[in-house]
Image (cartoon, helix red, strand yellow):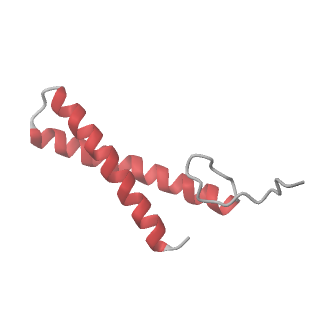
Amino acid sequence: MGFKFWFVRALKVFLAVAALLFIVELLKQHSVQEALIFACTWSLITTTVFICSRLYQSRKGVECALCNDIPDKSDKNT
């Protein structure tokens, strides 16, 4: 898994979390500027933690059923 894979994954996570947090902050009646700053800040933190943990798990060979980015090595035919 190269740089492009991790960049695209990080971008997807960042945008999804930012959109969700932005909407929640607007529903809490914060200003658009405050909501945007809050959403971008916490999205960056969340994305960093997620990508770093997935890189660590990927290097250790830990499989993630949800992400499904590491192929299953066990032989299910036996």
User: With 39 as the anchor, is 68 left or right in this view?
Assistant: right
Of residues 7 and 40, the one drawn nearer to the viewer in this rendering: 7
Q: Is residue 20 above or below residue 51?
A: above
Query: Going by the picture, which residue comes out furthest to the front?
Result: 77
Question: In x, y percent, where is residue 55?
Answer: 56, 60
Name the residue: 67% across, 52% down. Answer: 63
What percent of the width, then of the height, locates residue 62?
69, 53
Q: Nearer the viewer, residue 53 or 19?
A: 19
Q: Report the residue that reaches farthest toward the top.
A: 28
Residue at image position (83%, 57%) is 75
Q: State the count of labels.
A: 0
Q: Quadrant of residue 23?
A: top left
Left or right? Give the position of 48 relative to 64: left
Instruction: Pick the quarter of the image with the N terminus.
Output: bottom right
Residue at the image position 26 percent from the left and 44 percent from the top: 19
Horizontal side, residue 20 vs residue 69: left or right = left
Question: What residue sits 19% from the left and 45% below the top?
Answer: 37
Q: Quadrant of the C terminus?
A: bottom right
6 up-or-down from 38: above or below: below
